[in-house]
Image: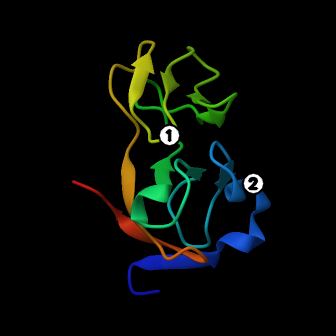
Amino acid sequence: MNGQFSFPVADFPQLATVGGVVLGRPTGFPSKLLITRVQPGTGPDAIAALSSVCPHLGCTVLPGSGALQCPCHDSRYTLTGAFVTGPAAVGLLRYTVAFDGTTVTVSTTPRS
């Protein structure tokens, strides 16, 4: 609604701890998203919202052990979407997130 969607973080217990990741496609959203818990505490930087589409060949990036990984050609990314290694050579598309400690709100417009 109004170019964003929201959900209570309590609905996804894996987001309660740093390193937790949820992969899913919100209703009406064009592709799957990775929502990651990237630092303790509250505030907008505690949660990242990333496109799950690998910029290399469009495969779905999956959660791994403390990182994100494309299963097609092994491109790897941090939990904030920054490129680490592999043929992709660029990071994942990021979306603006607001987090007040209980509710996550994600803009459906990518960050510039």
At a point 52% along the width and 39% down the height, the residue shown is 79
Nearer mark to the viewer, of 2 and 1? 2
Looking at the rendered structure, the kind of residue marked 2 is: Gln
**Frontmost residue, 44 versus 108:** 44
Say which element carries label 2.
helix
Element on which disc 1 rests: loop
In the rendered structure, find residue 14 and report the number of the disc placed on it: 2
Left or right: where does residue 77 sit relative to residue 60?
Answer: left
Query: How far from the left and from the top, in percent, is residue 103?
Result: 58, 78
Quarter of the picture containing the C terminus is bottom left
Please tell me which residue is depicted at 63% across the width and 60% down the height of the picture: 25
Residue 86 against residue 48 in the figure, above or below = above
The residue carrying mark 1 is 53
Label 2, residues with CA under 10 Å away: few <14, some 14-19, many ≥20? some
The residue at the point 48 percent across, 53 percent down is 48
Residue 53 locus on image (x, y percent) = 50, 40
Residue 89 or residue 58, whichever sits in front? 89
In the displayed structure, does residue 2 sit left or right of residue 70? left
* Residue 105 image position (x, y, % from top left): 49, 74
Amino acid at dot 1: Val
